[in-house]
Image (cartoon, helix red, strand yellow):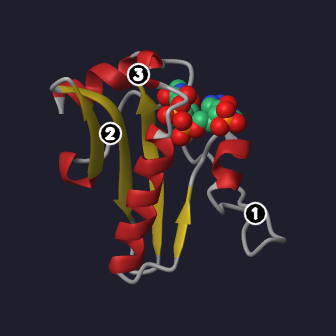
Amino acid sequence: MAAIRGLIRLFPDKLVQGNLPRVASFFVAEAGGKVIGCCALQIYSKRMAEVRSLAVHPDYQDAGVATKLVKRCTERARERGIREVFAVTSATEFFERLGFNTFRREKTAMFFDVSV
Ligand SMILES: CC(C)(COP(=O)(O)OP(=O)(O)OC[C@H]1O[C@@H](n2cnc3c(N)ncnc32)[C@H](O)[C@@H]1OP(=O)(O)O)[C@@H](O)C(=O)NCCC(=O)NCCS
């Protein structure tokens, strides 16, 4: 988890830093004995899960690492019988290429910030 945190800290503007998913939710990519990529599948219910905390170290980007990590997450969701996996992200094109789309290809997910 320390290595995962270190990776996520590299991207303070892009990734939520607090309240990370528990370690068992993560898949990691390793190179040279170091964690160079991470991605979590946070399961909320039998039906719904979120891909969270996706990060790849800058030295290892553009080599397909994130693609593999997200695919492992969607595979895990399928194995568990989960029907919908979502991502809250600014990297929409990246996720679109992996088959993510607007909800049921027509609706938009909207959020209400209860803390405000
Ligand atoms: C986004 C990120 C995880 C991609 O990791 P990666 O291992 O380089 O991704 P892959 O090699 O599997 O795919 C690379 C492709 O994604 C594209 N991509 C990378 N960041 C992107 C972004 N912010 N928006 C859209 N596309 C993006 C690249 O341009 C590349 O496209 P190409 O194949 O046409 O060259 C990595 O850039 C990263 O850690 N960024 C900082 C944290 C972040 O933004 N996380 C995602 C928020 S949920």
Nearest to the observer: residue 25 or residue 33 = 33
Question: What residue does disc 1 label?
Answer: 102
Which element is circle 3 on? loop
User: Residue tagged by mark 2?
Assistant: 20
Ligand 1 within 8 angstroms of badge 3 C-beta: yes
Q: Amino acid at mark 2?
A: Leu
Q: Quadrant of the C terminus?
A: top right
* Residue underneath mark 3: 57
Residue 27, labelled with which disc?
none
Judging depth in this view, the residue of 97 and 113 nearest the camera is 97
Q: Identify whether 69 is placed above or below 18.
A: below
Instruction: Kindly report the distance in space between the C-alpha atoms of the residues bearing marks 2 and 3.
Output: 18 Å
Looking at the rendering, which quadrant does residue 37 occupy? top left
Where residue 95 appears, x then y in whole percent?
64, 50
Compared to residue 46, the image places residue 57 above or below, namely above
Three-letter residue code for mark 3: His
